[in-house]
Amino acid sequence: MYILSFLWIFFMPILVLCGLFGGVFLIITGVKYRKLLVIVMGVLSLSFVVLPYVFWGMGIDGDKIPSVPTVLYWILFSLTGLLAGFNGLQAKIKSIRNMGFIIFTMGILGAIFYYLMSVPDSFYIK
């Protein structure tokens, strides 16, 4: 189904921008409020988005180095947002909480859309 591939193609820039800006935001806000876990989750969120492009620029196949399936890779990305969101919820810092849950939601949607794109056509009713 080509329409399911379009979901991933159109969603991917949103996911990348969310990871970039969300990661930078978590790093800056974590430094501001002196939250080490938020800083680490921001660095991880940023690196999960930047790492495939670095590998691509170096000519390395991204599936070979981390050796993690792509759906699991985006679920791990979303877990960084979930941990940051829970840390912001515990510390009662709305900005960290909101950004963490936005990253979590975008990561889960990215994993779902990638899975729908990669499912063979025989799984669908024609």
Image (spheres, rainbow, N blue to C red):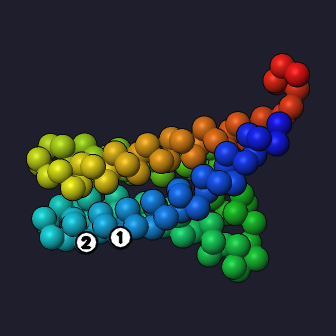
- The three-letter code of the residue at mark 1 reads Val
Residue under the image location 48 percent in, 47 percent down: 106
Disc 1 + disc 2, Cβ < 8 Å: yes
What separation in Å lies between label 1 and label 2 (alpha carbons)? Answer: 6 Å
Q: Residues within 10 Å of mark 1 (few under 14, many from 20)?
A: some
* SS for dot 2: helix
Residue 85 visible: yes
Residue under the image location 45 percent in, 67 percent down: 20
Residue 60 vertical placement versus 110 (above, below) = below
Residue 36 vertical placement versus 60 (above, below) = above
- Residue 91 vs residue 6, the one in the foreground: 6
- The three-letter code of the residue at mark 2 reads Ile
Tell me how many marks there are.
Answer: 2
In the displayed structure image, the side of residue 92 where residue 44 appears, left or right? right
Q: Which residue is mark 2?
A: 28
Quadrant into which the C terminus falls: top right
Percent of width and height locating residue 101: 34, 45
As drawn, which residue projects farthest toward the top? 125
Give the image quarter of residue 124. top right
Residue under the image location 69 percent in, 54 percent down: 9
- Residue 62 vs residue 17, the one in the foreground: 17
Q: Which residue is mark 1?
A: 24
Residue 8 vertical placement versus 18 (above, below) = above
In the displayed structure image, the side of residue 112 where residue 2 appears, left or right? right
Residue 10 vertical placement versus 39 (above, below) = above
Q: Residues within 10 Å of mark 2 (few under 14, many from 20)?
A: some
Quadrant into which the N terminus falls: top right
- Residue 33 vs residue 68, the one in the foreground: 33
Percent of width and height locating residue 98: 27, 49
Percent of width and height locating residue 8: 67, 49
